Image (cartoon, rainbow, N blue to C red):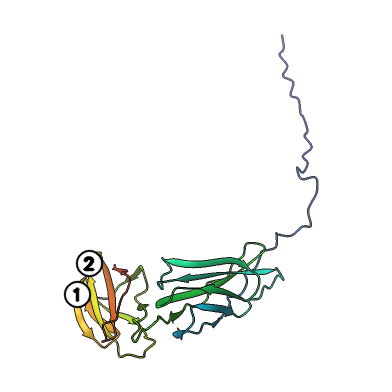
Amino acid sequence: MKKYIYILFVTFTLGSCSGGTSDEGPEDTNLNPTTPGLISPTNNLLCVDATLNFSWNAATDADGNAINYLLEIATDNQFANIVKMRNNITATSTQFSLETGTSYYWRVKAMDEEDGASDYSSVYQFYTEGVGLVNHIPFLPALIGPEMEATVSESSVTLEWTASDVDNDTLMYDLYFGTTETPELVSENQSETTYVSTVSSASNYYWKVVVKDGKGGASIGPVWRFSVN
């Protein structure tokens, strides 16, 4: 008895799941607004009035979106202690009443209606005059280098900062430096705003600066950090 093997050929017609091609392009990408520039209070200003008008240059948006602004005022230049904040500002100015006899730092950034945001503006510092004050404490020191959390490769490093004082007093600096989070005093009453030190590989370093005006006024800066690979 012969055995027959029947082979069934089935032809499939393959089709496109999409049902056709699309002429649509990729979604448009929202462009962030430009960064506003600060106008007033000007940098290093001594303010005789504690009620101040803050103003800045208008940002632009390449997409034509509506722009609003966020303004922050802090008592430190790292903005860890923000004392005044206002968002959704549609104008390029706003007013705040502040405490007298205090150093303040302020910045602005722009945002659009599509949640795009600019970088923060530069930071301006000012001082509100106190009743009967004859001396004003210096502003907090500002970091120049190495940048916060930077990694360096050299066997020596130059620490650099800047500071100012509304009285234009001659400033002196105490520098604290070391491998612990509470660095030790390594230089006292120096006039230079740099300090060079040898460093070891595979180590973390911490440092801070105390700014003194020679009249009893002093500002203690934050602790900055960097590492050596």
Q: Which residue is drawn at 58% across and 79% down?
A: 55
Of 71 and 226, nearer the camera is 71
Q: Position of residue 69 (x, y in %)?
A: 60, 70
Counting from the top left corner in percent of width and height, residue 135 is at 33, 85
Going from N to C along the chain, the mark reached first, 1 or 2, is 2
Q: Choose between 125 and 137: the one closer to the eye.
A: 137
Residue type highlighted by circle 1 = Leu
- The label shown at residue 179 is 2
Name the front one of labels 1 and 2. Answer: 1
How many C-alpha atoms fall within 10 Å of the one at disc 2: few (<14), some, or many (≥20)?
some
Left or right? Give the position of 104 relative to 23: left
Say if mark 1 contacts mark 2, CB within 8 Å. Answer: no
In the depicted view, which residue is nearer to us: 68 or 119?
A: 68
Describe residue 135's horizontal placement relative to residue 107 as left or right: left
Q: Is residue 154 above or below residue 229?
A: below
Residue underneath mark 1: 185
Q: What element carries label 1?
A: strand
Amino acid type of the residue tagged 2 in the rendering:
Thr
Question: Residue drawn 70% across and 59% down?
Answer: 27
Left or right of 47 in this view: 211: left
Query: On the rendered structure, is 24 left or right of 187?
Result: right
Outermost residue to the front = 132
The answer for how far apart the CA atoms under marks 1 and 2 are is 12 Å
**Residue 60: quarter of image:** bottom right
Q: Measured along the vertical axis of the image, is residue 68 above or below residue 18?
A: below
Q: Residue 63's image quarter?
A: bottom right
Where's residue 184, x and y in %? 19, 71
